[in-house]
Amino acid sequence: MNLNDLRTEADAEHPPVTVGLSDGTDATLTPLLRLPQTVRDTVMAKLADLDGQDPAVTEQANRQAHIAADILRTVADKGEQLLAELDGDVVLTMKVLGKWRA
């Protein structure tokens, strides 16, 4: 077994989440465990911050949306385009983040 074989297995066990964009391309969200450690640590801190918020309060909901957008920008290969197409829709942004976290 070589590194390429192991990489193929890892890709199958931890596939990325892809979101189709309006231009026909996909934004690919890299699984948390496949990110470099420094990036993973940053994303995990943001996820902890996100999970600690109370979404019932408008200010906190806006903060959650901002944190979620930061995470998507970090893990998606076309993060800016994905966020532009999400167009500030908090529910849709959280759904995409939820798919990635699953």
Image (cartoon, grey):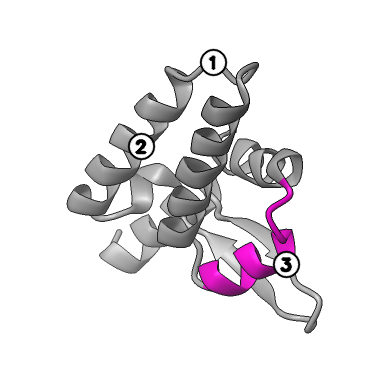
Q: Amino acid at mark 3?
A: Glu
Q: Nearer the viewer, mark 1 or mark 3?
A: 1
Q: CA distance from mark 2 to mark 3?
A: 22 Å
Q: Which residue is mark 3?
A: 85
Task: Give, as a single range, the part of the protein colored magenta.
Answer: 78-89
State yes or no: discs 2 and 1 in contact (Cβ < 8 Å): no
Q: CA distance from mark 1 to mark 3?
A: 26 Å
Q: Earlier in the sequence, mark 2 or mark 1?
A: 2
Q: Earlier in the sequence, mark 2 or mark 3?
A: 2
Q: Nearer the viewer, mark 2 or mark 1?
A: 1
Q: Which residue is mark 2?
A: 46
Would residue 70 be found to the left or right of residue 46 on screen? Answer: right
Q: Which residue is mark 1?
A: 54
Q: Quadrant of residue 87?
A: bottom right
Q: CA distance from mark 2 to mark 1?
A: 15 Å
Asked whether the viewer can see residue 9, the reply is: no
Residue 13 higher or lower than 2, as above or below: above
Q: Residue at x 27, y 64 (%)?
A: 3
Residue 35 position within the rendered picture, expressed as x and y whole percent measured from the top left: 32, 53
Q: Amino acid at mark 2?
A: Lys
Would residue 15 be found to the left or right of residue 71 on screen? Answer: right
User: Is 25 part of what is drawn in magenta?
Assistant: no
Image quarter where the C terminus lies is top right
Residue 94 position within the rendered picture, expressed as x and y whole percent measured from the top left: 65, 39
Image quarter where the N terminus lies is bottom left
Nearest the eye: 15 or 40: 40
Q: Residues within 10 Å of mark 2 (few under 14, many from 20)?
A: some
Q: Amino acid at mark 1?
A: Asp
Q: Residue at x 41, y 32 (%)?
A: 47
Q: Residue furthest front?
A: 59
Residue 23 higher or lower than 12, as above or below: below
